[in-house]
């Protein structure tokens, strides 16, 4: 008797077993809970992004404050252009974080994209204004 077909069938069963288990678990979820589970995922993601933005902005605030304090202590002048660029980038990032914080579930992805763009611009302004200060 040739065992190759039997081994092939067995290996296919092993590959399909996780899919069958997933289908069985999904079918056990009561229909009344399905919309709540679907809505929970975006809400959790939005909540995670809001917390992340708050933490990033707190870190930026501390970093900028420490650097400007250091600049003043050493008597270094930031320069009007550099100061204006960093201030503008900081205010835009604050506005974006505020938008993200106030966004509804329908609009939070746009707010997230805006926040990411302004956070990138803040990082770029920081790099130009305070090179070598991480």
Image (cartoon, rainbow, N blue to C red):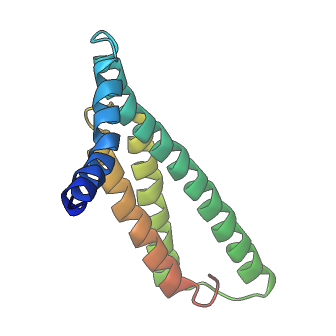
At x 44%, y 35%, the residue is 44
* Any part of residue 40 in sight: yes
Q: Position of residue 2 (x, y in %)?
A: 20, 61
- Is 69 left, or right, of 115 in this rendering? right
Residue 40: quarter of image = top left
Nearest the camera: 117 or 45? 45
Q: How many marks?
A: 0
**As displayed, is residue 92 above or below residue 45?**
below
Q: In the image, is residue 65 above or below residue 102?
A: below
**Quick check: can you spot residue 103?**
no
The answer to whether residue 83 is left or right of residue 59 is left
Quarter of the picture containing the N terminus is: bottom left
Q: Is residue 52 left or right of residue 43?
A: right
Residue pictured at 34% horizontal, 17% vertical: 29
Task: In this rendered view, identify the residue nearer to me: 55 or 28.
Answer: 28
Q: Position of residue 63 (x, y in %)?
A: 66, 69
Looking at the image, the residue that sits furthest to the right is 73
**Does 16 sit above or below residue 102?**
below
Which quarter of the figure is the C terminus placed in? Answer: bottom right
Q: 74 or 2, which lies in front?
A: 2
Query: Is 90 drawn above or below residue 86 in the view shown?
Result: above
Q: Position of residue 123 (x, y in %)?
A: 48, 74
The residue nearer to you, when weighing 31 against 97, is: 31
Residue drawn at point x = 34 percent, y = 42 percent: 18
Residue 118 position within the rendered picture, expressed as x and y whole percent measured from the top left: 38, 63
> Which residue is pictured at 45% across the width and 48% down the height?
97
């Amino acid at each position: 008797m040739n065992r190759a077909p039997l081994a092939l069938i067995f290996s296919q069963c092993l590959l399909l077993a996780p899919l069958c288990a997933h289908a069985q678990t999904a079918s056990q979820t009561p229909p009344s809970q399905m919309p709540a589970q679907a809505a929970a995922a975006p809400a959790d993601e939005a909540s995670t992004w809001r917390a992340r933005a708050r933490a990033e902005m707190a870190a930026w605030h501390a970093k900028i404050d420490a650097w400007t304090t250091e600049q003043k202590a050493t008597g270094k002048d930031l320069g009007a252009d550099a100061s204006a660029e960093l201030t503008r980038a900081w205010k835009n990032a604050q506005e974006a974080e505020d938008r993200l914080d106030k966004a509804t579930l329908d609009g939070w992805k746009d707010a997230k994209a805006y926040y990411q763009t302004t956070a990138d611009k803040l990082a770029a302004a920081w790099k130009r204004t305070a090179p070598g200060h991480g």
